[in-house]
Amino acid sequence: MPHKTPGMWPAMSYADLLDHASKSVAGALRELGIDNDDYTVEIPSKPGFGDVSCNVAFLAAKAAHRAPREIAVDIAKECRPTDLIERIEAHGSGHINFFANVPALNRSVITSALDGGSFAVDVGHGSKVAIEHTSVNPNKALHIGHMRNVVIGDVISRILKSTNHRVRVLNYVDDMGLQVAELVLGFAELGFSESDTGGKRFDQYCGDVVYVKASEKIKADPALKAKSMEILEAMEDQATDLAQTASRISHKILRSQLDTCWRIGARYDCLNFESHIVRSGMWARIFADLQKGSMVRLETEGKNAGCWIVPGSAPEDDKVLVRSNGVATYIAKDIPYAAWKLGKIPDPFGYEPCAQEQPDVPLLQTSLSAPEGAGADLQSDRVITVIDSRQTRLQTIITALLAKFFGATKQDYVHLAYESVTLSAETAAQMGQQTGGKNVQMSGRSGLFVNAVAVLDMLQERARAETLRRNPEMGADELDRVSEQIAVGAMRYEMIRQDLDKVITFDLASSMRLDGDTSSYIQYAHARAVRILQKADRPGGGADYASLCGAHERDLVRAIGTLGLSLRDSAVNLSPKVVARYARDLTVAFNAFYEHVRVIGSSEADPVTVARIELVDSFRAALAYALGLLGIPAPPRM
RNA sequence: GGGCCCAUAGCUCAGCUUGGAUAGAGUGUUGGACUUCUAAUCCAAUGGUCGAGGGAUCGAAGCCCUCUGGGCCCGCCA
């Protein structure tokens, strides 16, 4: 690569540019005897105000009893240029604007972008983070609501890995819950066949047919309700036939679910089974300690008589830990589990490879028979649990109890909440549910949900038709691969482009869009860049970085150079959306460049052409990295 | 009744954490650009009492308070 001088140029060019501006201001303030360190330097939202802007004059105006613009003039006069900053101007508004040395900045951004791996930034300093996501009850196929969980969790894990965190990804499998028991009832009591699924995938058959039917009958028949509770109790004892059946069925469903997660590129380090948590005796040990203290008590009267509770601030806030029949509640089971994740208690599990082989990275699962704590190294300094916001209240309680019992802080144990995915009125109507024009919550119990695999398959068909239309000569294998990559990207992007606290209204028709603010818009630009690079001879001559000075080139350079800033922001705030928007903004900058600036055509030894080719290559590298953070594939053709 | 979240263009959303320059995208509608590195693209026009009111501030979409509308949660289910 021409002009690549490792170590000579900063790896994070825009972060450095900001740093230069900040130090320049600090120096000026010292000269002027102004005492202020609250000011910020930032990249202006609009062009025309320089490359970096500082607000210090506004802040200093008050103490000095002077107009911001006057102070700005004084400060700007004292600011020293650097190798990245050419000049400094006080703007009439009071802002101080820094103008970059364009060739130096271009060179810096391009060389660091072309230096593989230089996009990563250090936020975590090597700290250990466990991320738990997916955690779908093993009684059904994943629907699009679950996909939001999987994608958020997976993207956060990718972002944290790229910001120097040691990340472990966990998937909690509740193989002992009521939902599994009700499904077992469908097979054991209602005559559903385990082998004849009517051509459906097993998870889909169980969730769409058996579970829905069983739920319906249980609701109508108290005897069946009692029966499902019996099954639930029987499942506690591994030796019973019902426990064996439950285990066999839930594992079979889990296998189908994992296929779906793997299809969209999610990977895990360990599956944690609730049955193992229960049978490990973790809760009993903690409970014995708790009983000695004053944080829990046995109720003798009132609605919770016979239960062990954690007293709340008011009687109605009391939370039951152990039921009157002696069985621990979900909250009780979650406390030792959370404590285990945080390494607050010894590891009671052994680990063994998951029987179903995961692509790319090995997958473990908890085991009670394998030797304990066999080097899985899962326990972490910080735990992030991805669960939808309907469980915020419960998670708040668990966080508070963890603080009380184990001294874990809010930073250690994070509930990463997101709003749910609802169905549009139109899509609900297509599924036979009239909602009077309103959106509706999905419901596994009543069968009102949109299957994730079905959506992926439809997306792939759409993408295949579109790709074939443009690439009639493309072979079947490549067509399959590319259309799958487009489908996966579309699904993932849709799940993270909005903020976590926004409800997603899923509409089947509009989810099939491949233009506008979608992942295929972004992927398409990647393919365009790859095509240019394929066609261009790479002469290896000197690049004229000063020539990249038009608005389109400069916008593109800025977009490439700010990847690290977006990555840091998204990691600190646990916000996948920040990277999604970055990828899109980067793409917008490239498309504008592409439309207006010719790359190939003139002499390819021309230093201007060399610079443009390097710019395109830098863009490709930055975009591929950003897409990697989002788990969105980057096809070279589409 | 209590708690959490949301409200910005016709629609879907950025911007709010850390107040500062003309509030931005996509979509929709209208018009335009393919003998050119892929038109899944681009350009132009259109479109905003930033839910309402009050407060602190030189300055508010952003901060504080009140209210309105909407979503979600409040089980010996998970």
Image: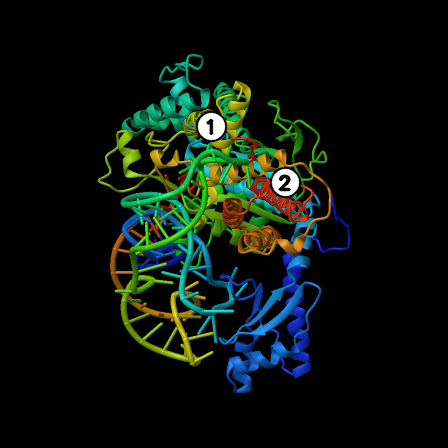
Q: Position of residue A322 (x, y in %)?
A: 48, 42
Q: Is residue A572 above or below residue B19?
A: above
Residue at (28% x, 38% y) in the render? A425
A581 or B41, which is in the foreground? B41
To which quarter of the image does residue A89 belong? bottom right
Residue at (63% x, 79% y) in the render? A77
Residue at (50% x, 76% y) in the render? A92
Residue lying furthest left? A436
Q: From the image, tell me which residue sits under label 2.
A: A168
Alpha carbon distance from label 2 to label 1: 41 Å
- Please tell me how crowded label 1 is: few (under 14), some (14-19), or many (20+) other residues with Cα within 10 Å: few
Residue lying furthest top? A196
- Please tell me how crowded label 2 is: few (under 14), some (14-19), or many (20+) other residues with Cα within 10 Å: many
Tell me if residue A92 can be seen.
yes
Residue type, numbered disc 1: Arg
Q: Chain of mark 1?
A: A
Residue type, numbered disc 2: Arg
Residues at discs 2 and 1 in contact (Cβ within 8 Å)? no
Q: From the image, tell me which residue sits under label 1.
A: A470
User: Where's the N terminus of chain A, which quadrant?
Assistant: top right
